[in-house]
Image: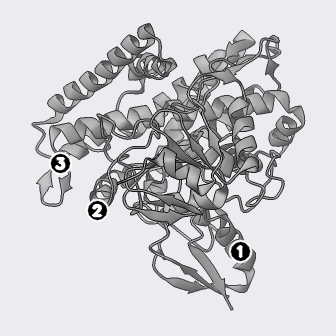
Amino acid sequence: VRLTVDGASCMGHGRCYAMAPDLLSYDDEGYVTIRDGSIDVPAGQVEAAQDAAGTCPEQAITLTG
Amino acid sequence: MTSTAGERQAIQGCPVIHQDFAPPQAAGCHWAMADELREASPVFFNTFAQGYWVFTRHEAVRDIYKTPELFSSESITPWQPDPIYRFVPTQIDAPDHIKYRRIVNPWFSPRAIEAAEPRMRELCRRLVEDVAPQGECDVVVEFALRFPTEAFLSVIGIDPSDADLFVPWVEDFFRGFGGDSDGLEAMAKALDGIREYWVAAIAERREDAVPREGDLASHLLHARFDDRPLTDAELLDMLTVLVLAGLDTTRATLGYLFRHLATHPEHRRRLVAEPELIPAVVEEALRYYTIVFGDGRKVTRDAEFHGVQLKRGDMVYALVSGANRDPRAYERADEFVLDRRRNQHMGFANGPHRCLGAHLARRELQLAVQEWLRVIPDFSIDGSAELSERGGGAMMTLTSLPLRWEVAS
């Protein structure tokens, strides 16, 4: 599973890294560090990734694969 | 010839209401009204004041927030399309808005709040331990404003004891939304007090060669907007807005959350047993007890939007309190679900104007519930008087919440 953040949509609510603290982290302004990028989700983190995507108020996170 | 918004809505067949949303009501009435409007129609035209559109459902409210190029923040009060005042950065649009936000974002980032947490917890613990032996208190008056004020001041590098000044100012300012002449006079005086405080704070810091560590006012004096320093007017405005936006809002949410816990002992007991649920409960309170009745925006160009033809200069009201309880967007939308997962609420707004203080507010709300329940696990509402709430002209808040509990001997 690949997690992608749409940088134009991310507004730094911080819900994703609260839901998936072992997968995602924040920068100095409170945006997710992979604000305009994507990462492979390790097998053990898929549910946390789904929580992060499903909690984002801006629907900025998509999961593929 | 241009038609007025009122004439056009008749053509479009949109239902019409005539409703002043600002007066105070019995506690909870604003959400009942938002629910009723949302289920009756996705959009209304409200002929109150100059007239404005009211969008009631989740999808349209989200789209308003996410389309700032069509919906300007120049006015955020739908019945005041041409405010005499523009708060910075609240009422500033792109491209300048993000430049102001980048100056202040780091002060309210998760990293900053994480660093401040031990201090905030200590402040909270002291306030709860002060009140606990009384066996009763009006939590809205004695705790729910005092704690966020002290916490905020400590985060921006001001002595928390200056809450003695800020608490009465904030009380008087927001009481002024009641609209009577005494209230308006006190409101103006309170605003003067806040501004004079910052004028003095800025003057005291102006000659510093380098910014003071952990001191927001000092940091703003050294900040750059493009290639210039901030003007005194901008500095004063930004500091004042933080006070007006950050303190009363947290008090309001705490009031409804404490009322919920006082009247739902099963929820209270579960939180005492499982404190790890507190962050989820805070999110659910932000959804279910959204204190922003609606958010206004001003239309920048003629456009069709969710079935109505908007004209440049029209005002729209995004009914965020209704949207956060929209069954089209949430399962069991009309229930307070203690352990709700994947809660996408818009309690801090969406889009570029997302609440600057969201990370601070969340942490304050979590700390308040943790520390209160640790010392006072059982409490109820004292007396049977009907609780009332301030109207939707500012943020809704309980005006009073008397609680009582047993004091261990």
Which chain letter goes with mark 2?
B
Q: Residue at x 42, y 51 (%)?
A: B3
In the depicted structure, whether residue B92 falls above or below residue A36: above
Which chain letter goes with mark 3?
B
Please indicate whether residue B71 sits to the left or right of residue B337 in the image. left
Q: Please report whichever mark, 2 or 3, sits nearer to the chain's N-terminal start.
A: 2
Where residue B201 sits, quadrant-wise, is top left
Q: CA distance from mark 2 to mark 3?
A: 21 Å
Residue B95 bears which disc, if any?
2
In the depicted structure, whether residue A62 falls above or below residue B89: below
Residue A50 bears which disc, if any?
1
Residue placed most toward the observer, B381 or B317: B317
Where residue A52 sits, quadrant-wise, is bottom right
> Residue B133 at what x, y percent from top left?
71, 13
Residues at marks 3 and 1 on the same chain = no
What amino acid is labelled 2 in the image?
Pro
Q: Residue at x 47, y 29 (%)?
A: B149
Q: CA distance from mark 3 to mark 1?
A: 42 Å
